Amino acid sequence: MGVFDRLVARSRRRSPWLFRLNSGGCNGCDIEFSACLAPRYDVEQTGALVVGSARHADILCVTGPVTRGARASLETIFAQIGEPKAVVAVGNCPASGDVFAGSPEIAGPLDRIVPVDVFIPGCPPRPGDIVAGIARAVAALPGKGAGNGKGNGIRKKMTGGARRA
Amino acid sequence: MSYTVPLGPYHPALEEPCRIDLDCEGETVRGAEIRLKFNFRGVEWLAERKNFIQAVALIERVCGICSNVHAMTFCRALETLAGVDVPERARHIRLVVAELERVTSHLLWTGLAAEIMGFQTLFMACFALRERAMDVLEGLSGNRVNYGMNRVGGVTRDIADPGAIRSEVLRLREETLKKIAPVFLDDRTVRARCAGIGVLSGDLARAWGAVGPTARASGVPQDIRKAAPYEAYGRLDFHVPLETAGDVNARVVVRLLELIETYGLLEQALGTMPGGPLAGPEFVEIPAGEATARSEAPRGECFYYVAAGGAEAPLRVKIRTPSFVNMPLVAAMVRGANLADVPLINASIDPCYSCTCR
C-alpha cells in the first residue's frame, strides 16, 4: 500500500459517508435513522455524513425487506458505490423479512441480493444500536476492495470502478 | 423547450422511495406523474393468511410513523364485528397514545419540512423536542416506534402515573410554544419560502376528496374526531384549526395549531383518566360478517374494512390510508410551480408511501 492509499484509508476511517436506502419497509427504521442525525444521538459527531448520491458514499444503509419493486434500484445503487464499500442491514426486515416474510412481493432477504457486512437487529433498532452498527461497518472497510493494498483506491472511486487498460 | 426531470425514487429530500416524473418547461413544472410501487409488500394479502392476533402485529407495521393508529383502527373494526365493548380506561389510554403519536408525527414533519427549506437549526430544534415526546411513549409502551398497545377489546398496558405524563406534556407544550411555534408562525424566512406555493383550492380539495391537515388548510373542515367521535374524543373539548389560503404556509400553520390542540387533548384525557379494567377477555371469537372503522391519523382519515368468515384468519382486509387520497393532489399542486419548490410541495402533504403502497 502506497503512502497515498494509506492516507486515504486513514482519512476514510473518520469520515464514513452514508447512503440511506428504504427498500420497501414500513419506514420505522428510517425514522430511527433520522433520529440518529438529530441532536441526541448525532451520528455526525463521528464524522459520518448522509449524502444524496450513492456515488459519493462508502456505506449503504438498507432498511426494509427488499420488495420486488425496489430490487432493481437496490442493485443499481449498490453498483454505483465505489470500492471499498460496506452494507449495513438496519432492522429485522432486511435480515429475515420479519412480519412480511412469505409475501410473494418480497425479493429479500437482503444478503441474497448484495453482500451484507453488519446486521442491526430490532423492529426498529434503537438509534444507539444504529450508530454502533455504522461504527462496525467503518471498521470493516479497510479489509475490502481498494483498501487491501492493491492500490488505486482513490482512482477507482473517482472513475466509479472503471479499470484502466 | 420541454423536458422531463425525474425526482427519485431515491432522492435526498424523500425519506421513502417515490418516483415523480416532472414535465418541465424551463424551470416551470407543467405536469407530474407519480409512481409508487417501491413499498408494496402485500400487507393485505399477508393479513388474510394470519390469525387475528398475528394480524394486529402485522397491521401495526403498515407504517412506522402512524403505527398505533393502524393497529387501533383494525382493532376497532374487529371489536365492531365481535360486538365487544372496550372499557372506559382503555378508551382513554388509546386516545393518549394516539395523540402522543400525533405529537411525534407532527414534530417529525415540521423537522423534515425545515430541513427541506434548508433551515437546519429548526430541524435540530424540532427533533430535539421530538425525542422528549418519544421518551414519554417509550416510558408507556417500552418501544420507540411500534408500541404494541392495542389488542382486540382493549389495550395491553396501563398508564400507571397519568399525573407525571401530564406534567411532561405541559412542559412539551411550553417548549413548543416558546421555541417551535413562533418560528413557523412568524418568521419571515419560513413565510417567504412557504407562502403562495403549492396552492390547493377548497373546491379542488373537496372534489378530489382531500383529507386531514391538507384539506383543513384549504378550508375544508374535515376531521373524523369531530365528525364521527370514537374512543373518548366525544367527551373532550377541542377545536379543529382551519385555514383558507391552501398554500404550503397554511398547511404548516394548520399542523402547528393542531399540535397545540393535541397537547390540550392530552392534558384533559390524562386529567380525567377513569379507573377500571384495561381489556376484556384474552381471546375474542370473531364471528362471520364485515365491519368498517375509521380514525383520524396524523395525516387524515384512515379507513379499515374487515370481512371475516368465522375462521381463524380474516377473509379480507382493506386499508385506505390518508396519503392514498392526498398523493394525487401533489400532481395538481405542482402544476405551474418552480422546479425547486417541488420537494417542499410534495412534503407539505406529509406523504407516507409505506402506508400508501402497503
Image (cartoon, coloured by chain):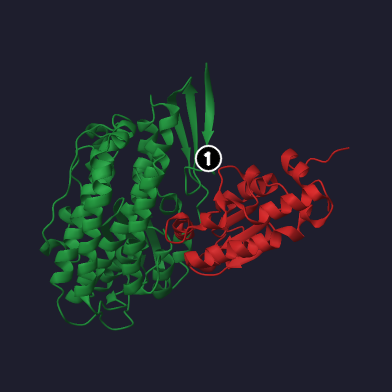
Mark 1 belongs to which subunit?
B
Chain letter, colour red: A
| Image coords of residue B88 (percent x, y) | 17, 75
For the question of whether residue B86 can be seen, the reply is no
| Image coords of residue B96 (percent x, y) | 24, 67
Say left or right for B151 vs A114.
left
In terms of depth relative to the viewer, which is nearer, B120 or B73?
Answer: B120
In terms of depth relative to the viewer, which is nearer, A46 or B100?
Answer: A46
Mark 1: give few (<14), some (14-19) or many (20+) Cα within 10 Å: some
SS type, badge 1: loop
For chain B, the rendered hue is green
Task: Please identify the residue farthest to the right as the structure is shown.
Answer: A165
Location of residue A39 by image quarter: bottom left
Residue indicated by mark 1? B8
Location of residue B14 with respect to B330 vertically, above or below: below
Q: Residue at x 56, y 60 (%)?
A: A65
Q: Quadrant of the C terminus of chain B?
A: bottom left
Q: Residue at x 28, y 66 (%)?
A: B97
Location of residue A42 with respect to B162 vertically, above or below: above
Location of residue B255 with respect to B151 vertically, above or below: above
Q: Residue at x 52, y 42 (%)?
A: B11
Tell how many labels.
Answer: 1
